[in-house]
Amino acid sequence: MIPAPFDYVAATSAAHALDLLAQHGDDAKLLAGGHSLLPMMKLRLAQPAVLIDIGQVEELRGITASGDELVIGAMTRHAELAASDLVRAGAPLLAHAAAQVGDPQIRHRGTIGGSLAHADPAADLPMALVALGGSVEVRGPGGSRVVGADDFFAGYFETALEEGELLAAVRVPSRPGVPWGYQKFVRRANDWAIVGAAAIGGRIALANMGPKPVRALAAEQALAGGASPAEAAELAAEGTSPGEDIHADRAYRQHLARVLTRRALEHQS
Amino acid sequence: MSILGTRVLRTEDPRFLTTGGVYTEDVTDDRLAGAVHLCFVRSPVAHAKITGIDVSAARDAPGVVAVYTGADLESLPPRKGMGPTNKEMYQRPLATDTVRFVGEPVAVVVTEKPDQGEDAAELVSVDYDTLPAVVSLADARDGKTLLFPAAGTNVACDFGDRSAAAADLFDGCDVVVTRTIINRRVAPAPMESRSAAAAWSEDGRLTAWIPNQGAQGTKGSLARQLSIDPAQVRVITPDVGGAFGAKFGADPEHAITCWVARELGRPARWSETRYENLIGMTHGRAQEQTITIGGTRDGSVLAYRLDVLQDSGAYLRIGAVLPSLTILMAPGPYDIPRAEAFATSLVTTTTPMGAYRGAGRPEATAALERAMDLFAAEIGLDPAEVRRKNLLAPFTEPHRTAFGALYDSGDYAAALDRALAAAGYDGLRREQAERRARGDTLQLGIGVASYVEITGGGDESGPPSENATVEVHPDGTATILTGTSPHGQGHETAWAMLASDELGIPIDKITLKWGDTDLVPEGGGTGGSRSLQQGGAAVQQASRELIEVARDRAAAELEASPADLVFDVDSSTFAVAGDPEASVPLASLAQEERLLVRTVFSAPDATYPFGTHVAVAEVDTETGKVFLRRVITVDDAGVVLNPLLAEGQRHGGIAQGAAQAFLEEVVYDSDGNPLTASFADYPILSATEVPSFELAEMATPTTYNPLGAKGIGEAGSIGATPAVQNAVIDAVAHLGVRHIDMPTSPQRVWAAIQAAASGSGSSRSENA
Amino acid sequence: MQVKLTVNGEARSADIEPRLLLVHYLREHLGLRAANVGCDTTSCGACTVLLNGRSVKSCTVLTAQAAGAQVITAEGLGSKDSLHPVQAAFRQEHGLQCGFCTPGMVMAATSLLAENPNPTEEQVREGLEGNLCRCTGYHNIVRAVLAAAQAGGGAAPPAAGGGAGQEAGQ
């Protein structure tokens, strides 16, 4: 299987990429690591006329500490994220999540920006960003804006990114030593989560429990009110409406959300 | 010292590890220069009338050479099924008026370059008038919707007469347990998908490169599908990237590739995508089995009944008749006084059913080994103990079963005991009891499965046989031609070992050739675990006969009596007894005249390998997730030629068998849409779901061939499936669960625990 | 479009369609057919090669994305007469049967050992999670990778240079 024909342009800077986006409008798609987009193009589920490759744009890469935040360039690859001393110290949940994405080959190519912009509700990094209460830095024709994780994911494979914008960087709070828990329920190690749960500092995020990564707000409130992890976890599925597929029906997913939330709260690193 | 029985490394490996194998897609050949490329348009609906096909836009697309539909292929016959099946249910090469499964070829786009076909195929417009899908066996049986109205039924064939079932089969039993279980549909999924390349020469002869398990069978199938004389067909077998039963013969797509090449007067090539492979290549298993077992409270099984509904898929392939093997092996390794088995094959609007590693026998073992566990649970005895009590006593003379199988040799209890000892069975049971007492979240299950299977069977044409040709060349090398067809089994090494052991020629100077029907016109291919016991035996026999031919030549040269000559294998030299100076090397005897022998080895009958598998699984009782921790097996396939290769066959089979038990299944929705048509959705086993395997050795020779060897290729998949399934169920048995259908997915396991806890009874066995 | 890259130590310049996947460039343009296509969904790993020293699935990389990069395939790792230690270990432990997954499996193992020269069995299994094999049940593949690690195989450079573990071009 091969993609339908397209034109390819390698952007040399973020500004160049924005220019190209403005020029080609919605005929164009940004290409990062390509590990979400290219498979869809091979299956002809996506047929952009122009691919703007931002994978080599140096200013979109790298990890730096800025005050009490880590700033991660959107083109940072999963393997780099997982191995980064800065991330492992300041946001170990994120490093752990990055190490769970796909398989080693995918982690060598896929980028955090690509994964977040793809917004698969079953994926690791969107859930991690929501759990961490991070944000993304979006650049567009009119300048930059910062969008919080809770507002960034809009729906099934949909984000707050507007036409002509690109996701430039990811910001997560650096909180060394804060306990965290991460549970990903799969049948095979490299599968997408049937359900996932990530918890840190009183926030709980769930993967694949709806059209986007969601917070387990009822459970969070119970925790804040002094409930035990087990008691709080019982509320983890409240308000969720997960889909059904060959792996799990709705009731089973909700059951898993409760079990995994409890484990994420009880088994913290 | 003989190299037989030693761990000889594979001679074929260096090229596979560096430049890679030359699979059909990799073949470069002058005859294929300028080849066109095929891309099939496949039905997106399970069951529909075709009311119109518009190919005009596709014809105008870049690079398109031709577009064909079913109407263009009307002169070709349908692809026949096997055995006593319903002739109305054969598949047309391209659908004409009706499609019957998602993936059925409807049209074919032929282009100059391979990548142009995908683009052009999207432009073929087919109008479908949808008909009701028939997905469940219940719907197939009630016949409200018929796939083939002309047949008047969805029944493809019956095995056994249920009206003759014994009313008193279970008389005298203290306990009778009955249950309907599902042996689910799985995909063979060889890593190399299907492929073909075809070229016609000016004299009207076809050369076809096709990945297959037996070029001679593929040649016959192509000739039938193309309605041409088999003598006009040459099949060449490139390296084959796995087959597992699904690459015997030729599929309609292979025949169409050849037809297109003839029609256009240009060579043609076709390679499918994985999506096409998962919906277009035959599937395996897919039986609904009603098992009834009865016996006494002290653990003696007195009677067993197996009633099978086989899902044949939309058109009749070998899968429709495999229940005959399930029935043949129904009573397995046990001495059951009364047993009956019946089967009915039904067509459904799904991918046609073929053979998959084990082909009918894993289904028999899965049913029986579940039955033994259900019976043991009902009477409260240890399942290993119940098995030991009912296994046939050791025998060295062939034993005839009530179903007509003639078991050649066996000591089934010894295999069971050896496996249990290797597993540390008693210790595992103690650990299980401790975890149960503690109420651990992670519970331990131990599953046992004893089996006997049939390998290397003959067919209606006679007893099992295979041919081999061995030739020694003047330069000291040798060539072997074989009718078997390796695709991972290592025949290049193994057959060379057999010849080397007789001829004294090092294995790296021996070349094996196979799979070219002009070179090897006859042969049974590789399947049914037949290769070593027949093909290998033929190589050994040919080598021995060659030594006798050479002995006569040596005698003439040395002016001695043949009886006075001694052949020294180490030096590959004949010498006169008592006069080592008077000697002649074997190779030099090939100088004047070719030194070559072709022979046919015939076995008296099939052989019956046996063994016991023990699986240890942990089950997370909160989520239902299964962790396979250990698999311990005894697989007695007689004398082993090369332990490295035999172990590899066992490992692969165990993994596939285990995968069926807890992971893999082909799923359709109620409209007949496949939901598992990619490797992202079909949960093919990866390295993280299995442990390393523990193999215990046991070798009971057969007398049916001089090697003493039985088949080993399918043992793993036959024993491991019920062992793993039984282990999973055993892990939650104390919670009241008696059965969980395969694959024991997390949701199924969790649901079974919930049902048992709520006492809904769905997980309890019914008492008859 | 024009793309320059290095394959098995040799500088290459290609005039390609933008949609050309790296695996097809290697197989069809260069005749390097060890890497195979086994699926459509970046699942099977049969097409695995090293890109700047790290394993990637070449069915999900555009040739254009490999511009300026170093690519190593199984052909460039070792030769029939001089197997790379990882290849030699696969032979020694019978870590291959039909061979279709093998070149990709070997490249994935090479990358794995470059990143973790002394893996545990569990780490080997996890490190190969992106490579499917239908023949071996993974048993002997895992043994082969562990044996290669013991023999220091992860440190051995490919015959073609541009080695595993290097970050050339990044």
Image (cartoon, rainbow, N blue to C red):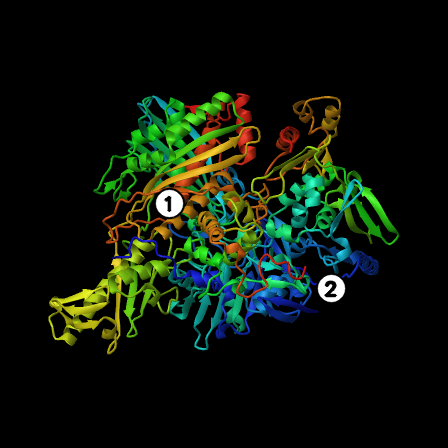
In this view, the residue in front, B491 or A80, is A80
The percent coordinates of residue C77 (x first, y second) are 52, 62
Q: Quadrant of residue B430?
A: top left
Label 2: few (<14), some (14–19) or many (≥20) C-alpha neighbours in 10 Å: some
Type of amino acid under label 1: Ala
Task: Say whether residue A129 is visible.
Answer: yes
Q: Position of residue B291 (x, y in %)?
A: 40, 32
In the image, is residue B626 above or below residue B54? Answer: above
| Secondary element type, mark 2 | strand
Q: Amino acid at mark 2?
A: Asp
Vertical comparison of B497 with C133: above or below: below
Residue B520 place in picture, x, y as percent: 34, 66
Q: Quadrant of the C terminus of chain B?
A: top left
C25 vs A91: above or below: below
**Residue B715 got which mark?**
1
Q: Label 2 lies in what chain?
A: A
Identify the residue at the far right of this view: A142
Q: Secondary structure at mark 1?
A: helix
Residue B607 in the figure: left or right of residue C123: left
Compare residues B746 and A34 and report the one nearer the observer: A34
Crowding around mark 1 (Cα neighbors within 10 Å: few <14, some 14 to 19, many 20+) is: many
Q: Is residue B461 visible?
A: no
Say which quarter of the image contains residue A223. top right
* Numbered label attached to residue A36: none
To which chain does the residue with label 1 belong? B
Q: Dots 1 and 2: beta carbons under 8 Å?
A: no
| Above or below, comparing residue B201 to residue A177 in the picture | below
What residue does disc 2 label? A7
